[in-house]
Amino acid sequence: MFSLGVTVNNPNTEGNIGSLLYMRWKDSEGEWGCNWTNVLFQTGHFILNGWDKWRAVGPVDLSQTTGLNWDDDQVSELWIKIEAEQTEFSPEPIDVRIGWIKLEESAP
């Protein structure tokens, strides 16, 4: 189970257009267990735009996330990527604030 406290401030967009959360992981041999996978797409959880949109996202059962191939017993590294909408006309940097991340074993 994965959850985090997060917000994104993207001054290049208006409104609540949020961000995507991608993950991938490595096993103890250093091999990738999957490609970058959009974790929130299947869950109904969202990362919203704006400092006032701080929220807890999750919990997400990673073992049920299609494409992630999650295996609690084999993961040695977890990589996280937050991707916000940006175009060639996006001159301002995008700020990401993560307050906490929680990773727990899935229920049996």
Image (cartoon, rainbow, N blue to C red):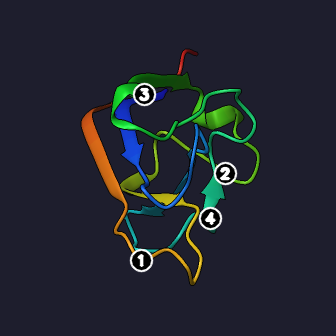
* Whole-percent x, y for residue 63 in the image: 63, 35
SS assignment at label 3: helix
Dot 3 alpha-carbon crowd within 10 angstroms: few under 14, some 14 to 19, many 20 or more: some
Considering depth in this image, is 65 or 17 the residue closer to the camera?
17
Q: Residue furthest top?
A: 107
Mark 4 or mark 3, earlier in chain: 4
83 on left or right of 77? right
* Left or right of residue 69: residue 49: left
Identify which amino acid the numbered label 2 is placed on.
Answer: Asn
Residue 79 position (above or below residue 93): above
Q: Residue at x 60, y 65 (%)?
A: 36
For residue 100, above or below residue 70: above
Q: Amino acid at mark 1?
A: Pro
Residue 69 - label: 2
Mark 4 or mark 1, which is nearer the start of the sequence? Answer: 4
Name, please, the residue furthest toward the bottom: 88
Q: Residue 50 at x, y = what percent?
A: 41, 38
Q: Give the secondary structure at mark 1.
A: loop
Sequence-wise, the earlier of marks 4 and 2 is: 4
| Above or below, comparing residue 74 to residue 2 in the picture | below
Give residue 92's quadrant in the image: bottom left
Q: Tell me the residue that label 4 is attached to.
A: 34
- Which disc, if any, is residue 53? 3
Q: Earlier in the sequence, mark 1 or mark 3?
A: 3
Residues 72 and 23: in front is 23
Q: Secondary structure at mark 2?
A: loop
Q: Which residue is mark 1?
A: 91
